[in-house]
Image: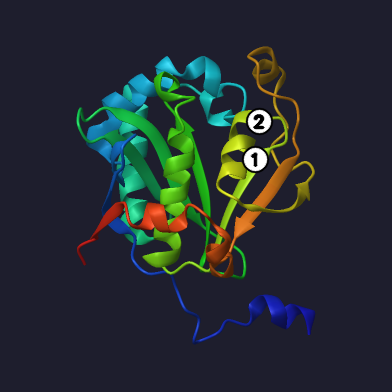
Amino acid sequence: MIESLYTMKSKEQVCLKAPPKEISFTNPKFSLLIRPLEGRDAACVHEAVISSHEALLSFMSWAHQELSKEGQKARLCEARKNYDAGLEYELGVFDRNTGEFIMAASWTPSQRLNRKALEIGYWTHSNHCNKGLATYVTRILIVVAFDVMKSDRVEICCNVKNMASLRVIEKCDFKLEGEIRNYFEEPTEEMLRNNYFSERSCLRYALIPEDKPSLPWYHEIANSISVSPLSP
């Protein structure tokens, strides 16, 4: 009986709708273009990573790997393929007025039983931290996940020591579901010497469509975005 729970698949399982080709957002504070990252973005993404490297080292394990423009280009070419295949949705956030890359964000489909669940992730160029950008982008991704992609669960997780991300999560009114111990990989001694946090516990938060009426910012965001569909 237990085995059948893992092997049985529903023939009527409903999948996510297609992700957007791009998202435009404008309000008095920001004018943003959000679109899939691809190989042509390697130079600006690499520059942002290098400029923000010291800040990224604390909680991003990938920041401790070898970083190069060539490696970034190969990774982003693969990321674009994954976007079109529905495996993972890696996004770049750009200033619409200047074209500057200012933030990376993502939706990652759940690998668990609910195939309509998405997890949000992000990091911000250090030149654009403490401006409220991460809060707005996270809210935009929540709205598009629910209203465009028809997700029925949006998750976000955060190291218990990551105070900046916890503030973003709170401003987005996510519901805390619990603390997961030993969630993050055990850091190496070299990572610890380079300021990676030794704390491995994760706080898991989520929203579901039934939470939308209680989100005071939801309609403002929904009315401020324009979504272009991905071509079939």
Q: Point out which mark residue 158 bears.
A: 1
58 over 18 or under it: above or below: above
Q: Which quarter of the rendering shows the N terminus?
A: bottom right
Which residue corresponds to the image point at 69% horizontal and 39% vertical from the top-left? 184
Query: Which residue is under mark 2?
Result: 162
Q: How many marks?
A: 2
Image coordinates of residue 163 in percent, x first then y, are 66, 30
Which residue corresponds to the image point at 65% horizontal and 40% vertical from the top-left? 158
Which residue corresponds to the image point at 51% horizontal and 43% vertical from the top-left? 121
Q: Residues within 10 Å of mark 2 (few under 14, many from 20)?
A: some
Q: Residues within 10 Å of mark 1 (few under 14, many from 20)?
A: many
- Inspect the image, locate mark 2, and give the three-letter code of the amino acid beneath it: Asn
Q: Point out which mark residue 117 bears.
A: none
Left or right: residue 98 versus residue 72 is left
Image coordinates of residue 126 in percent, x first then y, are 45, 20
36 over 194 or under it: above or below: below
- Is 21 or 223 nearer to us in this picture? 223
Left or right: residue 226 versus residue 71 is left
48 over 231 or under it: above or below: above
Q: Which quarter of the rendering shows the C terminus?
A: bottom left
- Inspect the image, locate mark 1, and give the three-letter code of the amino acid beneath it: Cys
Left or right: residue 56 versus residue 30 is right
- Is 3 or 44 nearer to us in this picture? 44
Q: Choose top left, top right, bottom left or bottom right for residue 136.
A: top left
* Residues at circles 2 and 1 in contact by the CB criterion of under 8 Å: yes
